Every structure is written in C-alpha cells, then in structure tokens.
Image: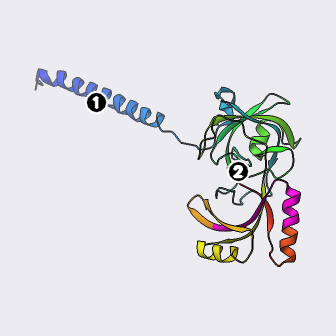
Amino acid sequence: MQRPAFYFRDYPSRSRIFFYSSIFLFLLILQACGIVRTTERQPSPRSAEDVDAGMMLQSGVASWYGSKFHGRATANGETYNMNDFTAAHRTLPFNTVVKVENLDNGSSVVVRINDRGPYVDNRVIDLSRRAAREIDMENAGTANVEIYLVEEGDRPIGDRRVTNIETYTVQLASFNTEREANAYSQRISGSRAERVTFGNAVAYRVYYGTFSSISDARDAQRRLARQGHEGFVKQAEN
C-alpha cells in the first residue's frame, strides 16, 4: 500500500524541529551555568595591582599574626581566619578596605580591616598570614609598607591621613547591661561606662582614664590593682 506523500515531508520536519529545539535547550542550560557567580567578601590578591587606590593613609612597619589567634573573635565580632585577606589597624573604621604595598619588594595586597592592633611600638598594621604571604613578608615577619585607601568602611575617614597619635585606657570590666556597668563605674572615681557593639552583639565596658603613653596607662593599672580593681591596658578607640 502506498504511503501518503505528506508522510515523507512531515517526518523530517518534525525531526529537524526536535533537533534544533534540543540544541536551543542545551545552549540555554550552558548559558545559565555560565552566569552563576559566587560573591566573596574578602578582597582577591590577584586584583591588587589593578586596584585604583586613593590617598595614602599611612606608612610604617607592617607585621602579621597567625595560628595563635586563628579561630578567636576579632575586635568587630568576627572569627579571625588567618587564611582570609584581613588586617588589624588601631584606628581605621571596621570594614575599611586598604591596599598595602611592601616597599621592600614592590608587591601589594588588598585587605579589609576587621580587628584592632598591632600593639607593638612603631608598627602600623597587622596582616593576616595569607596577606603577609601575598607580599612575601611571612618569613621576615615585618616589612616597610605604605597603606592606601581603597574603600571607606563603617564611617568616613575624611580627607586626612591617619594620625600616629595613640591613646590608651585601662579596661576594668565588661557587662551585659548598662545598669550593671554604671553601678560598677560609680564605685571607681575617674572611670566611665561605654557601650560597645560587635556586629549584632552589645556590651557595656568600664574604662579608666585616657593616657597618651602606654607607660602612664600601665602605672594607672598598677595603682588600680593595689586598690583591688583588676584590669588591663588597651588601645583607646580614636
């Protein structure tokens, strides 16, 4: 029995439609896979040379800190990860992004400020181990650097350089409520209660005095200890 003529015309047509539809669907899936991206808060060292850095904030000696502090809380409430591109600075606002250039070899790295320090004289920034490795100062321990602003953090810096004027205070206690902190502060003349935030957490700390030198702050700490008030010296927030 002879098949209708339209049978031969229809079958190849439907085959072509199925074939091209399959290709189109495959291309859509491939495109969708290609546009999936992951967002990473940590700056990438590979982009350091391409970063359009702004004003120079500071110059001095950089150091780094690693495994001893790995997993501990940073000053802004995060968990320190020595493998992230972060750094500690005494006064720059948290989440400020800076470019650190190693003047000894010309290499640079971009880091985000999430901690306070370093608490060693003549040092201006404490890098994570990974950041230190990126500018080849891990083995040396320190390097002469310049710090450039890339992105302002939680509060604006303004058109000025970071000052090297440091102040110190004695921290005596920390409480969960303002009432407890004020009650404790009233027992010690010259002390004050301050509200401190760590991300979503809040604490109320009691501080004593503001000193321009760490030796004066330590003298005050010893006097307070003799009076029965134990505390420790820390860098004051400027």
Say if mark 1 contacts mark 2, CB within 8 Å: no
Q: How many labels does the image show?
A: 2
Residue placed at 68% from the left, 35% from the top? 160
Query: Residue 214's x, y, as percent?
Result: 85, 56
Query: Residue 71's x, y, as percent?
Result: 71, 59
Above or below, 205 relative to 2? below
Residue 238, numbered circle: 2
The colouring scheme, among rainbow, by chain, secondary structure or one colour, is: rainbow
Residue placed at 61% from the left, 72% from the top? 176
Look at the image and say whether residue 209 sits in the magenta stretch: yes
Q: Name the residue under label 1.
A: 18
Q: Which of 138 and 112 is in front in this view?
A: 112
Above or below, 123 relative to 53? below
What stretch of residues is rendered in magenta?
A: 204-220
Mark 1 belongs to which amino acid? Phe
Classify mark 2: helix, strand or loop. loop
Q: Within 10 Å of the Cα at label 1, are there few (<14), some (14-19), or many (20+) other Cα atoms?
A: few
Q: Is residue 177 visible?
A: no
Residue placed at 62% from the left, 67% from the top? 203
Q: Which of 149 and 101 is in front in this view?
A: 149
Residue placed at 79% from the left, 70% from the top? 231
Q: Is residue 222 visible?
A: yes
The answer to which quarter of the image holds residue 62 is top right
Query: Residue 100's x, y, as percent?
Result: 74, 35
Tell me which numbered mark, 1 or 2, is placed earlier along the sequence. Answer: 1
Q: Nearer the viewer, residue 15 or 1?
A: 15
Above or below, 182 relative to 7? below
Name the front one of labels 1 and 2. Answer: 2
Extreme front residue here?
189
Mark 2 belongs to which amino acid? Asn
